[in-house]
Image: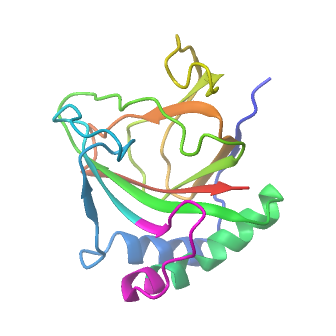
């Protein structure tokens, strides 16, 4: 039995549109990352890059002293409150946005876990795109980490206003878009 939950049309349309308008705006800041799945990867393959915007680093405070983070957080507060209620989780330990961009070839990013301790991971897709999220049957463990043979549990298409959640110890990853200019999501981990 799958431990993945999928919620289509998660937010009311006007709330979703506010989020999309803010995050997809040409004035929203994005920060280059050599490897979209791991900042520890010092020399990733040239095509594994992406952009991120951190709202709350792991076990840190929300970065609300930064004006741009505060503006984005204010738009996302309804998303966070609804996630907490629906997923029955009280504490966000990490939340950030990721953007990958078009390539004319399919690139599967490195399999990973966001946090290597028990958590619930959610992904909220900001825009319709391609570049499925891949969740594997295998979980991270202290002996093997992610270095194990992986079998796909489920692939999920990025659809705007779709929320997915799953056990955060499941190894997962995603693809770049090949039919859209970008793929934008909000990745949150709950204690």
Please give left or right for residue 91 compared with residue 95 in the image: right
Q: Residue at x 67, y 42 (%)?
A: 117
Applied colour scheme? rainbow
Residue 55 included in the magenta stretch of the image: yes
Please give left or right for residue 20 compared with residue 84 in the image: left
Q: In the depicted view, which residue is nearer to us: 152 or 14?
A: 152
Question: Relative to residue 144, is residue 97 depicted above or below?
Answer: below
The answer to whether residue 100 of the structure is visible from this angle is: yes
Q: Residue at x 65, y 41 (%)?
A: 168
Q: Residue at x 72, y 73 (%)?
A: 81
List x then y, in percent, for residue 134: 51, 30
Please give left or right for residue 134 compared with residue 129 in the image: right
Q: Residue at x 50, y 49 (%)?
A: 159
Rendered image quadrant of residue 140: top right
Residue 102 included in the magenta stretch of the image: no
List x then y, in percent, for residue 186: 50, 59
Question: Relative to residue 127, is residue 1 depicted above or below?
Answer: above
Q: Quadrant of the C terminus?
A: bottom right
Single out the residue that lies furthest toward the front: 143
Q: Quadrant of the N terminus?
A: top right
Q: In the depicted view, which residue is nearer to us: 124 or 117?
A: 117
List x then y, in percent, for residue 128: 42, 52
In this picture, which residue range is highlighted in magenta? 54-71
List x then y, in percent, for residue 42: 25, 40
Rendered image quadrant of residue 124: bottom right
Rendered image quadrant of residue 5: top right
Q: In the depicted view, which residue is nearer to us: 49 or 142?
A: 142
Question: Relative to residue 8, is residue 140 depicted above or below?
Answer: above
Please give left or right for residue 182 compared with residue 3 in the image: left
């Amino acid at each position: 039995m799958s431990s993945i939950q999928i919620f289509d049309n998660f937010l009311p349309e006007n709330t979703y549109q506010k989020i999309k308008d803010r995050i997809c705006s040409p004035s929203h800041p994005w920060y280059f990352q050599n490897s979209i799945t791991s900042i520890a990867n010092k020399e990733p393959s040239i095509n594994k890059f992406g952009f991120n915007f951190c709202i709350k680093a792991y076990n840190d405070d929300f970065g609300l002293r930064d004006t741009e983070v505060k503006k984005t957080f204010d738009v996302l507060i309804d998303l966070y409150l609804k996630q907490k209620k629906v997923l029955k989780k009280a504490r966000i330990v990490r939340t950030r946005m990721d953007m990958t961009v078009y390539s004319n070839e399919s690139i599967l990013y490195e399999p990973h876990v966001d946090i290597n301790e028990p958590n619930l991971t959610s992904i909220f897709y900001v825009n319709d795109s391609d570049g499925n999220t891949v969740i594997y049957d295998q979980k991270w463990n202290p002996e093997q980490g992610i270095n194990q043979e992986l079998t796909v549990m489920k692939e999920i298409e990025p659809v705007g206003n779709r929320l997915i959640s799953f056990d955060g110890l499941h190894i997962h990853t995603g693809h770049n878009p090949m039919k859209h200019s970008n793929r934008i999501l909000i990745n949150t981990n709950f204690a």
